[in-house]
Image: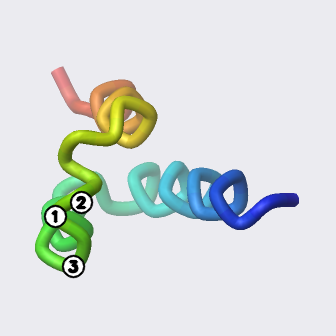
Amino acid sequence: MGQRAEALYWLNEALDEDYDSHQYLFEWRPDLLVDPEIRAIITAFQPF
């Protein structure tokens, strides 16, 4: 599994466990705010 694919897998796991903490990701890597794949995953986990 490539590094990006593995990172996306763990992002899914982390969001499933604690969605509200995803903002820490952007504090650590602000460039990910504009990554469409990251945004799509986060949006998919967004509570209604």
Using residue 14 as the reference point, say whether residue 21 is left or right of it.
left
Q: Report the residue marked by disc 2.
A: 22
Q: Secondary structure at mark 2?
A: helix
**Looking at the figure, which quarter contains the C terminus?**
top left
Q: Disc 1 or 2, which lies upstream in sequence? A: 2
**Looking at the figure, which quarter contains the N terminus?**
bottom right
Q: Position of residue 24 (x, y in %)?
A: 18, 72
**On screen, 45 above or below 21?**
above
Q: Position of residue 15 (x, y in %)?
A: 39, 53
Q: Disc 2 or 3, which lies upstream in sequence? A: 2
Residue at 35% x, 30% y: name it: 36
**Mark 3 and mark 1: Cα distance apart in space:** 6 Å
Q: Nearer the viewer, mark 2 or mark 3?
A: 3
Using residue 5 as the reference point, say whether residue 32 is left or right of it.
left
Using residue 39 as the reference point, say whether residue 12 is left or right of it.
right
Q: Secondary structure at mark 1?
A: helix
Residue at 59% x, 63% y: name it: 7
**On screen, 43 above or below 31?**
above
Q: Position of residue 45 (x, y in %)?
A: 35, 34
What is the three-letter code of the residue carrying label 3?
A: Trp
Q: Report the residue marked by disc 1.
A: 30
Q: Report the residue marked by disc 3.
A: 28
Residue at 22% x, 58% y: name it: 31
Total numbered badges shown on the rendered structure: 3
Question: Which residue is at the far top?
Answer: 48
Q: Nearer the viewer, residue 5 or 42?
A: 5
